[in-house]
């Protein structure tokens, strides 16, 4: 158990709550019957009674993470899926320009009059192969999402301006990517500038473990000018190459799971969330739990602002129909029926309320000893 109240623990131990409170008192803690105890505190009290705390083995239906861990998928159900790519780099090195450049050259072409809509991510199509770009600031995406245990990026593009070289946020970006164990492609940007010095960039990055292939390493460096749209095709080719080696696969024939990229409250539409479907297929009408929110997918809009009925693996879509605004990095899970989704959703939002209430008066082993 990660956490139990004094009353719950008493019940499990077949003791009176007053007895547990007495024991805590002997340990120097004034506790109330509703006080939450953390895992270590629970173990300490159980040890005192000579009871071993059994690890709970059954699946906690309300823990969305467990749905991400079930992987008994038959090989035959798996299909190749597009990579989800994050662009990171130092401020002013050209991240936004690059995202715009890719979007304009690849999204609008072929999509007659398609005006792209900002939903926090978009997809491009290169000769039938798709790439999903996360449009949220890369660092924020990595930090908030990783803080929540969600990893949604398959590949990181690190943009370095050739006239400026490696800067603090470049190093930060490299560290994020390394911690997440995702492959890195370096885009050496602003090559159109007379002061561009790509050799210096390569030299400096070598010191951070990114050695170009030409120098005997295994990091792909692509010289580009995001402003002039030069080198973008090569960059996209390299992304597809790395993705192919990664053999990214998903099962489109299962209920969808994935992660929230952005979410906000819209005056007319209510809670609006951009979701990245990571596995399965999301459909209009699906009963869904998103973080602590739940509901049924009412409408879905893609990155071109078009209404869609379904979204497969690695597709970003904006959805409405959930009761609350989730947070970036929250996970979502689709359930077979609305009843289960509502039960899980209600239980999760209750837990969230209780957790925020008991946060202050929570007894952990640390403050237990502090008080002793
Ligand atoms: P971000 O902070 O990383 O998102 O950087 P931006 O994309 O906002 O770019 C910062 C500045 O660099 C802007 O004035 C861009 O026009 C400029 N810039 C971006 N890419 C290039 C490029 O390839 N060449 C040149 N000359 N300028 C660029
Ligand atoms: Mg920017």
Image (cartoon, rainbow, N blue to C red):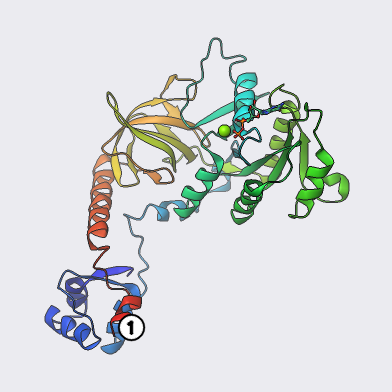
In this rendering, would 343 be left or right of 110? left
Residue 77 at least partly seen: yes
The x, y position of residue 79, in whole percent, is 58, 39
In this rendering, would 325 be left or right of 78? left
User: Badge 1, how many Cα within 10 Å: few under 14, some, many 20+?
Assistant: few
* Image height of 111 relative to 229, above or below: above
Residue drawn at x 56%, y 41% is 138
Q: So how many labels did they put on this image?
A: 1
Viewer-proximal residue among 10 and 249: 10
Residue drawn at x 59%, y 30% is 96
Instruction: Specify the quadrant of the image occupied by residue 51.
Output: bottom left
Quadrant containing the N terminus is bottom left
- Give the structural element (helix, strand or loop) at label 1: loop
The x, y position of residue 114, in whole percent, is 52, 14
Instruction: Specify the quadrant of the image occupied by residue 195.
Output: top right
Quadrant containing the C terminus is bottom left
In this rendering, would 329 be left or right of 210? left
Residue 335 at least partly seen: no
Residue that badge 1 annotates: 52
Residue drawn at x 31%, y 83% is 44
> For disc 1, does the CB lie below 8 Å from ligand 2?
no
* Image height of 342 relative to 224, above or below: below
Residue drawn at x 46%, y 29% is 119
In this rendering, would 133 be left or right of 186? left
The x, y position of residue 283, in whole percent, is 39, 31
């Amino acid at each position: 158990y990660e956490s139990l109240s004094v009353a719950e623990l008493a019940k499990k131990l077949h003791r009176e709550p007053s007895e547990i409170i007495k024991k805590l008192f002997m340990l120097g803690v004034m506790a109330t019957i509703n006080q939450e105890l953390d895992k270590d505190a629970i173990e300490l009290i159980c040890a005192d009674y000579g009871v071993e705390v059994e690890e709970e083995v059954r699946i906690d239906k309300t823990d969305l993470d467990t749905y991400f861990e079930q992987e008994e998928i038959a090989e035959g159900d798996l299909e190749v899926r597009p990579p989800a790519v994050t662009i990171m780099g130092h401020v002013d090195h050209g991240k936004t320009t690059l995202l715009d450049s890719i979007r304009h050259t690849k999204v609008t072409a072929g999509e007659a009059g398609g005006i792209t809509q900002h939903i926090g991510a978009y997809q491009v199509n290169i000769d039938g192969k798709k790439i999903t770009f996360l449009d949220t600031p890369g660092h924020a995406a990595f930090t908030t999402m990783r803080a929540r245990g969600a990893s949604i990026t398959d590949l990181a593009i690190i943009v370095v301006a050739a006239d400026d070289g490696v800067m603090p946020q470049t190093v930060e970006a490299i560290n994020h990517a390394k911690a997440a164990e995702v492959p890195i492609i370096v885009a050496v940007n602003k090559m159109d500038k007379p002061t561009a010095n790509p050799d210096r960039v390569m030299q400096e990055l070598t010191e951070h473990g990114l050695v170009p292939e030409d120098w005997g390493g295994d990091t792909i460096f692509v010289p580009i000018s995001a402003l002039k749209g030069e080198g973008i095709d090569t960059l996209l080719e390299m992304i597809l190459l790395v993705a192919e080696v990664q053999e990214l696969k998903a099962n489109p024939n299962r209920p969808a799971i994935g992660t929230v990229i952005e979410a906000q409250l819209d005056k007319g539409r209510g809670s609006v969330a951009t979701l990245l479907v990571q596995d399965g297929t999301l459909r209009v009408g699906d009963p869904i739990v998103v973080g602590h929110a739940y509901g049924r997918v009412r409408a879905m809009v893609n990155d071109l602002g078009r209404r869609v009925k379904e979204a497969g693996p690695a597709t970003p879509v904006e959805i409405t129909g959930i009761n609350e605004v989730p947070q970036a990095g929250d996970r979502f899970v689709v359930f077979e029926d609305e009843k289960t989704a509502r039960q899980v959703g209600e239980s999760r939002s209750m837990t969230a309320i209780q957790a925020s209430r008991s946060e202050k008066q929570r007894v952990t082993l640390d403050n237990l000893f502090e008080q002793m």
